[in-house]
Amino acid sequence: PERKPDTRDHKSLVREEDSFSMDALAQTAWIDCDKIDELLNVRIKVIVCVDGSSQASCAFDWVLRGFAQNDRETELRIVHYYDEAKEYLPPKWRKAAIEMDCETKCTSYLVTRRYNISCKQRTPGIKIGTELCKDIKEYGASFLAMGFQGRKGKDKHLIGSNVLEVMQDGKCSCIIFKESNPSLLPIGRPAKIVVSTGLNPAATKAFVDALRLSRPGDEIHVVYIRPYLESAERESEVTETIRSKYEGFFDGMKDAASWPTGKMTKFGDRNVKLVFAPQGINEGIAQALVRYSRNHDADFVMVGTNALRGEKGKPPLGSVSLQIVMLFDGNCVVSSFNPDTDSTLQAKK
């Protein structure tokens, strides 16, 4: 049938479209409070991939000597894939040396029941990233920590195929260590964590993961990049919604009566704040977030991603999140949000 012309004026259409988009954003802006409580209180299982590189060693040291010492229920699985054909590798990159180093360190910091060391021979033709995805599923890991050595020259910011495969198919949050100097790790001092946020459940999951990975006294800056044309005196509906959202979180961390179960107060000893960082002229959101992180000497930058992007034929990260991970020189955490298991319901106050 012939389509009738729309007689509504332009302003009415804009108002209706804005109202619809804001309602849709508000509905997807939260993870249910019960789900947050579940995530914050479930036993954390971490896989650490070691390969002899300085970056992987830093990942192992931080998880073992830092994170695992705060949460005494955390379980570790240390995984190393070796190739016997690579006899040319230096001794510290070989199976025997890596296995001995991991065993020595683990026995110094953990009781036996809290860790497992697995050294497996690499299967020809199968990527290590594929093997790690199998380990994640088998172990039920919450996080996977791995080193990223980077490349040289103009390709230095490109992410390696193993990291990308884990982010796309692993369906668990990925801690990417770029730091190679163990003396710079946040061990024995408060960590500085920057969380990139917005009105989407994956960003909320990144904040929840920041709480899970943090220790008492750590600084967590939840950063929203305010658009260049948005005035600080006249906030947009998106900005107001984000402010209200995190005020609810922070109130729950300070006062048990402000959260349905009162369980958020266990994180009240973290130093958290919401930051509306301005976007510079001719500057993208990713560049602004990275600039803020560098200026505040962040140890970790956290971004969220939908775990099902790969199944929909999309890259594992959205363009902004991917740029942040590529541009930031330090360690990054890609927080995996799975719509199939992490319910997105309106938070109850």
Image (spheres, grey):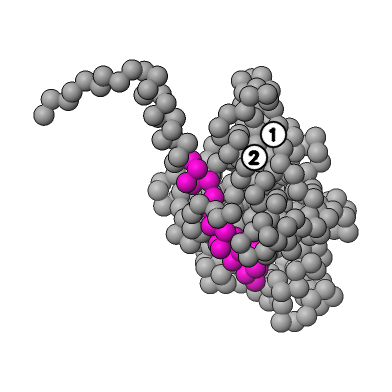
Write down the region rendered in magenta: 25-48
Position above or below: 117 against 218: below
Q: Rounded to the nearest whole Å, what is the CA distance between mark 2 and mark 1?
A: 9 Å
The answer to whether one can see residue 201 in this image is yes
Give the x, y percent position of residue 163: 59, 52
**Residue wearing tag 2:** 243
Sequence-first disc among 2 and 1: 2
Q: Residue at 51% x, 59% y: name it.
A: 342
> Residue 293's quadrant in the figure?
top right
Q: Residue at 61% x, 34% y: name it.
A: 239
Q: Residue at 48% x, 41% y: name it.
A: 25
> Residue 240's quadrant in the figure?
top right
Amino acid on which the number 2 mark rests in the picture: Arg
Secondary structure of the residue carrying numbered label 1: strand
Left or right: where 266 falls relative to 138: right
Position above or below: 138 against 208: below
Amino acid on which the number 1 mark rests in the picture: Phe
Q: In the picture, which quadrant includes the N terminus? A: top left
Residue found farthest to the front: 257
Give the x, y percent position of residue 170: 53, 59
**Residue wearing tag 1:** 276
